[in-house]
Amino acid sequence: MELRHLRYFLAVAEELHFSHAAQRLQIAQPPLSRQIQDLEEELGVTLFYRQKRKISLTPAGVLFQEKARHILDEVDDACHLAQKAHRGELGRLAIGFAGIATFSVMPRLIPAYQALYPSMELSLVQLGTSEQLRDIESGKLHLGLLCLPIDAPDVCCHIVNQEPYMIALPASHPLAFQPGPLALRDLSQENFIMTSRSVGKGYFDLTLRQCHQAGFSPTITQEVHELQTTVTFVAAGMGVALVPEGMGHSQARGVRFRPLFHAEPVLHTALAWLKTNTSPELQHFVSLAKKLFPAEHR
């Protein structure tokens, strides 16, 4: 038995007329009649009552019609799903993201992608830049949203955001309500809270560089795993932190975010993926990111 036998049977069962069914199938009537007879012989049952000018389904034919329609619907669904998967519209993407991406990039990128590709499953995991690179290179992650710079020749990058630093101060700090931007050197005697270099080398090194350019080496009293945790520690009065401008929009209690003099776009967030990964679903995601965050707008 082949799928064409089921399609032929259903056409006759729905038309209840061999000639009309043959026209619908665009085949001659005699071959259609032979195919139905072959099907009945294979099954060992009679599917149609045949009268001179009329045919009707036998009880066996009624049951067979229901199951045959279900089988063909399942086959059609399977073909449709396979075609969607081939086009990169169905499947799963594992995406890592650094904490900074939750403020500036993900609120735009993720909903836009899901609207375009609702059948795609996104598996999102928050990781530091070093961990993301490791998992991208091993194939555990398809994509990453991480902080530059990185040293990974097998990984492609597209910058999706760049922003200056702000300073996060405890709300009770004397500088918290001082008007105007602050000078970084005014914080040279403060305790700094930073993410660990093992988690985000780029962010850590950029913070040190900014402090050195301001004429001091920061006293780092706490290192944390996630960027958001720095704000929690600041709120507890444990120190100050340099944070990306996007975090200043958060409603963190007990924290004041203040702009800095001569703040330049120093922190770069990039979408990263393995050069050898040319899967259509990945390429769709990258294309959308480039459209939403084009180079000329950075």
Image (tube, rainbow, N blue to C red):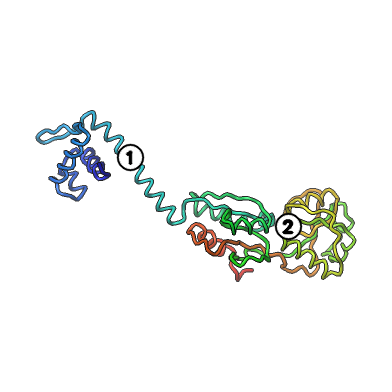
Q: Looking at the rendering, which quadrant does residue 258 occupy?
A: bottom right
Q: At which x and y percent is residue 231?
A: 78, 52
The residue under the point 55% across, 55% down is 112
Please state which amino acid type lies under the numbered disc 1.
Answer: Ile
The one of 19 and 42 positioned closer to us in this rendering? 42
| Figure check: 222 above or below 289 | above
| Amino acid at dot 2 | Ser
Element type at marker 1? Answer: helix
Query: Residue at the spot x=52%, y=58% of the render?
Result: 282
Give the residue number, with chain letter if any, for mark 1. 71
Q: Nearer the viewer, residue 53 or 83?
A: 83
Q: Quadrant of the N terminus?
A: top left
Q: CA distance from mark 1 to mark 2?
A: 55 Å
Secondary-structure class at tag 2: loop
Q: Which is more N-terminal, label 2 or label 1?
A: 1
Residue 280 pos. (x, y %): 47, 59
Q: Which residue is mark 2?
A: 198
121 in relation to 266, above or below: above
